[in-house]
Image (tube, grey):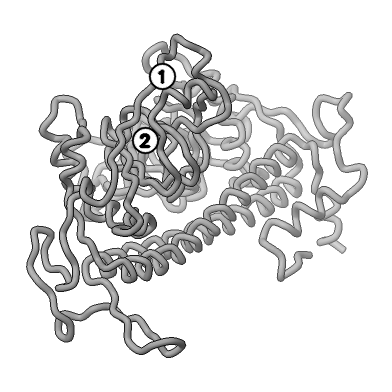
Amino acid sequence: MFNENAKPYQGVALMLKQQEGLRMDKTKCIPKNWGIVKLGEICEITMGQSPPSESYNMEGKGMPFLQGKQEFGSNHPINVKYTTKPLKIAFENSILISVRAPVGDVNIADKTYCIGRGLASLRAKKGIIALFLYYLMAFQKSDVEAIGEGSTFQAITKSQIFNFKILLPPVSEQRKIAEILETIDNAIEKTDAIIEKYKRIKQGLMQDLLTKGVVSEGEGESERWRLRDENIDKFKDSLLGRIPEEWEVVRLGEIGKIITGSTPSTENLEYYGDEYLFVSPEDIRENKYITDSQKKLSELGFRISRKIPSDSICVVCIGSTIGKIAITKTICTTNQQINSIVPNSNIFNSEALFYFIVLYSQKPLKQEAGLQAVPIVNKNRFSRIQIPLPPLHEQQRIASILSQIDEVIEKEQAYKEKLERIKKGLMEDLLTGKVRVNHLIEEEEK
């Protein structure tokens, strides 16, 4: 059925979209052969109840225990506690749904669990495919949230769960829909595993490269680089620990210009528009580069602001997200929560500087911030943070190695995001009956 050389989702998605006459008649409320049922008619509902706290343990004694949504993983729970006195049980393949703030999140039980009062268990009855029910409840999360009650603490009751109505296709369609969505989920999980693998590789490389560096051996095409070794190469003691003898220790203020951002008056709407990036901590994510911002400035707003050139390093220095770091890819401005470094290119390669700041700034930033009532590291304190300074050619080699790993991670993350978009679209089509899977079932039967 599937092209073995294609990405995991492509065979299903293409087949569904190429079929004629599969979309339901828009004049009808539900697809042919589908029904509208209450959850209580197709599931056994168990509301959680927390066991005595003295029965909890972390040593694996008793039954795995889930208190609430905080133990949910992407699809299956990640439990850390056990209890020797379980009260309410969720059996393997049951759907776990959070019933106390937040409401509506779901996981599927990969084994038997004891569940606390933050969860309920939906155990599918005969003729109901549990995996289909899981995807359906994930798709209808917002509908579950809508029935929650409580102004300060949202919750849903057993009665509300029982009476919650869903669209239910025949069991053959349930099975095929679940199979399609599980195929994509498996691809997402595999991609996640690849991303985490490369992140671990990167973390180890950073620790080695940014503390030991590399040396060149040979010339021209025969040139090779190797990691320094204290048994072979010379090292020295420094305020940052043992570093190569060729390296120096410098303050951030010594390697370039430090710029603290500012915010144009929000009362003057003429300052804001869609022309120039205005970077805030929310715009600095896991990505290495800043490519967009939630807010932007007009020509007038940009003119009165402090300009941050491309290839500058932006570091969040105020608030709970202190230490987030990224590189600018275009000229922009930032708000006052961010200190930026414009490196002197004769002293520090901007790509290399990014990695050195990532490794060496986190501890001093948090130490400086901890001395303040409001977590803040001002420009003066920020400029005093120390990092190693390798020779420029070595910086460039270090940056090249780590950038290659980052490129692989970014490529895999982009693929994962694509899979998630495809999954979202297929859930919208398949779980509402807009696209039917009958032709796939018929082909398998033939």
251 is higher (above) or lower (below) than 305: below
In the figure, residue 34 lies in which quadrant?
top right
**In this picture, residue 438 sits left or right of residue 327:** right
Q: Number of numbered discs present?
A: 2
Q: Residue at x 51, y 49 (%)?
A: 93
Q: Which residue is mark 2?
A: 68
Between the C-alphas of marks 2 and 1, the distance is 43 Å
In this orientation, which residue lies closer to the viewer: 56 or 25? Answer: 25
Secondary structure of the residue carrying tag 1 is loop
In the figure, residue 164 lies in which quadrant?
top right
Q: Earlier in the sequence, mark 2 or mark 1?
A: 2
Disc 1 residue type (three-letter): Pro
283 is higher (above) or lower (below) than 154: below
Q: Where, quadrant-wise, is the N terminus in this rendering?
A: bottom right
Q: Is residue 413 visible?
A: yes
Q: Residue 254, how many percent across, how many down? A: 21, 49
Question: Between tags 2 and 1, which lies in front?
Answer: 1
Residue 264: numbered disc: 1
Residue neighbourhood size for the residue with mark 1, other residues' Cα within 10 Å, grouped as few (<14), some (14–19), many (≥20): some
Q: Is residue 119 visible?
A: no
Secondary structure of the residue carrying tag 2 is loop
Q: Residue at x 20, y 40 (%)?
A: 382
In this orientation, which residue lies closer to the viewer: 286 or 330? Answer: 330
Q: Residue 215, how many percent across, how many down? A: 28, 79
